[in-house]
Amino acid sequence: MIKISPSVLASDFSKLGEEAVRMEKSGADYLHLDVMDGHFVPNISFGAPVIASIRNKTNLVFDVHLMISDPLKYVEDFAKAGADIITFHLESDSSADETIDKIHELGCKAGISIKPGTPPEAVYPYLLSVVMVFVFSVVSGFGGQSFLFFLMTKVNKIRDQIKMMGGEVDIQVDGGINEETAEVAARAGANVFVAGSAVFKAENAAEMIKKLREKAKV
């Protein structure tokens, strides 16, 4: 199933609650929340209190992406803040197995992410334990970058492995997603699309979400 997850990094932070409502009314499936600690990636965004402050504004699935060094230490904070899906990085300092188990214990769904330089094979051992694999289509850490087409070979390999294992795992892509690149990513095997500026800066967010969904139907 195709899912559109607008990234709040491109939203108006002075109206974050209103922006969340706008995305729900515009037909988004998820709301993508990038948590960056300034250590694991060279940028800082926001933490659990900000997520908690908008949880009662919308019924959208909160798609929380932890770009932090020690996710195991903080997953409980984000679960309590209202996360539905918690995705963490395989390259972090935390044990992947322990982090997945902790996310499940907290009643959330687990996702796993890899940076552009990490081979796709690294996620294979976890494909039966997570609901989503997150693949960057840009260099991690900043919004507004151009889509790197060569990274879609990684999506293709992961999708093939999922099929071989008989699993039902979403593949999410983030970075430079627009009408053109959504189609490219979908052909590679992605089905969850994180779009920031393309949606939040569009004249009509609902129309853009509709267009992205149509382009991804390949």
Image: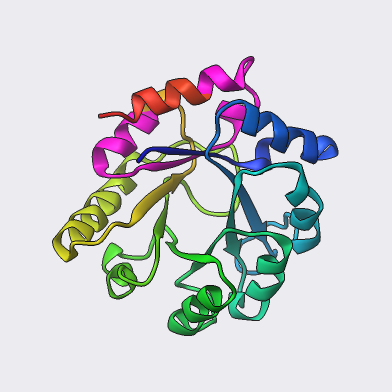
Corner quadrant of residue 60: top right
Percent across and percent down for residue 203 are: 64, 15
Left or right: 24, with 92 as reference point: right
The quadrant in which residue 77 appears is bottom right
* Camera-side residue of 84 and 117: 84
Q: Residue 159: percent from the left, percent from the top?
A: 24, 53
* Residue 193 is inside the magenta segment: yes
Query: Start and end of the magenta stretch?
Result: 181-208
Q: Position of residue 30 (x, y in %)?
A: 55, 43
- Quadrant containing the C terminus in the rendered view: top left
Which residue does the image show at 38% across and 61% down from the upper left? 117
Using residue 125 as the reference point, say whether residue 136 is left or right of it: right
Depth check: 113 or 40 in front?
113
Residue in front for this viewpoint, 80 or 140: 80
Residue at the far right in the pictured view: 14
Q: Is residue 112 above or below residue 103?
A: above
Spot occupied by residue 49 in the image (x, y as percentages of width and height) = 81, 60
At 39% from the left and 59% from the top, the residue drawn is 133
**Quadrant position of the N terminus in the picture:** top left
Q: Residue at image x 46%, y 34%? A: 177
Residue 154 lies, with reference to residue 211, above or below; the image says below
How many discs mark residues in the rendered view? 0
Question: Does 67 appear in magenta?
Answer: no
From this view, report whether residue 152 is shown above or below residue 66: above
41 horizontally vs 209: left or right: right
The way the protein has been coloured in the rendering is rainbow
Q: Residue at x 75, y 61 (%)?
A: 47
